[in-house]
Amino acid sequence: MQLFDFKTTYRFQTSPGIDQYNMPLYNTNGYPVQIEPGGQLISYYPVYQGFLGPAFVNGIQVPFYTEQGGFFNIWPNYIQALNNSFQGNGGATYTLTTPFFPALAGHVDITGIIAANSSIDPIVATTLNTSVPKTSTYPAVFITTQDANNNTVVVSDSGQFLSTTGVTGNMQLGMLTGAVAGGYSATVNTINYTTGQINVTFNENIPTGTPINIQSYYIQQGIPRAILFYNNTITLRPPPDVSYLVELETYLTPAAFLSTSQSVPFAYMAEYIARGAARKILSDTGDIEQFQFYEPLFREQENLVWKRSQRQFTATRTPTIFSDFSSQSPSNNFSGGGN
């Protein structure tokens, strides 16, 4: 239930060059895990029930989108192609450097994080996690060429990041998946999203003189001026060049209270929750007569809970062009004063 008491603000700091961020889960980044009394994992619960505007970046309000059409119409993903700049030498291993960087990095969505049973989002490891479904991976760098039989060979970044001893800024070093038939590469291929250096080993030798092409999404970095929330993913445009504070309105998922020693801290919900539990038990056991007896009592408590939130939502008058309760305007907040 999206009650007023569950309304909160989600804040996070961006990472330079990273444009996509998943909705946080209760099992990652230090959040508690949902466990049954018997010790079994219940599920991965999102911390929040979606996001809504207004949205702010470093305290400045920015447009908030929930549809891809309007967002990418203004901020298109333009593919920068570097064709025929490299050629095969008869081997499988290459070191390539492209000038069209920094570029966008690949992304693993929230479903992929759950499937991989990862405690870190984005995934950072010393090896490629092959449990991530291809349907949950959104590459942003593509390397294409042909083998001796003229079959297309494609290598793309996996959205996972490599953690190696002695490597600084490991969030800039991504892992690549090599594919001839959509499979994962057995080797660790890397790309540095800042410098554009790519170390790649194809699954087979590339004939001498065969073009090796590179494609990437290139967008100049800066302070984000628009936010898209889609597929449980927050996308920023332009991509951040440094860390920025992003703030979004949201509703907290009350499942958090199930995994702590504390009960729901809102006493007025106690009878509503108790009658809801009884209603669930009666429906599962098939006691329809008792279920029908409890249903009006459950609905009564539900209406009382909703009334509390509605009083808060309707406490403030809807602003119009003729109403300004605080006698403030954008000019009051940002101007230097004067007549």
Image (spheres, rainbow, N blue to C red):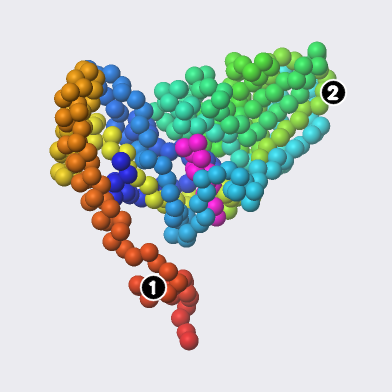
Q: Quick check: can you spot residue 5?
A: no
Specify the amino acid type for callout 2: Gly
Q: Is residue 26 above or below residue 178?
A: below
Specify the amino acid type for callout 1: Asp
Locate the N terminus and report the quarter of the image it occupies.
top left
Identify the residue at horizontal 55%, vertical 55% (top origin): 225
Which residue is identified by label 1?
324
- Residue 61, image x and y in percent? 47, 59
Residue nearer the viewer, 233 or 334? 233
Residue nearer the viewer, 104 or 89? 104
Residue 309 is left or right of residue 231, and the answer is left
Disc number for residue 209? 2
Is most of the magenta stretch helix, strand or loop?
Answer: strand
- Residue 184, image x and y in percent? 60, 18
Nearest to the eye among marks 1 and 2: give it. Answer: 1
Residue nearer the viewer, 95 or 283? 283
Q: Magenta stretch containing residue 66, yes or no?
A: no
In this picture, which residue range is highlighted in magenta?
Answer: 223-236
Identify the residue at horizontal 31%, vertical 21% (top origin): 41
Identify the residue at horizontal 59%, vertical 48% (top origin): 71
Identify the residue at horizontal 15%, vertical 38% (top origin): 271
Disc number for residue 10? none
- Residue 110, image x and y in percent? 46, 31
- Residue 50, image x and y in percent? 41, 42
Q: Assign a secondary structure to mark 2.
A: loop
Q: Quick check: can you spot residue 120?
A: yes
Which residue is outermost to the right?
209
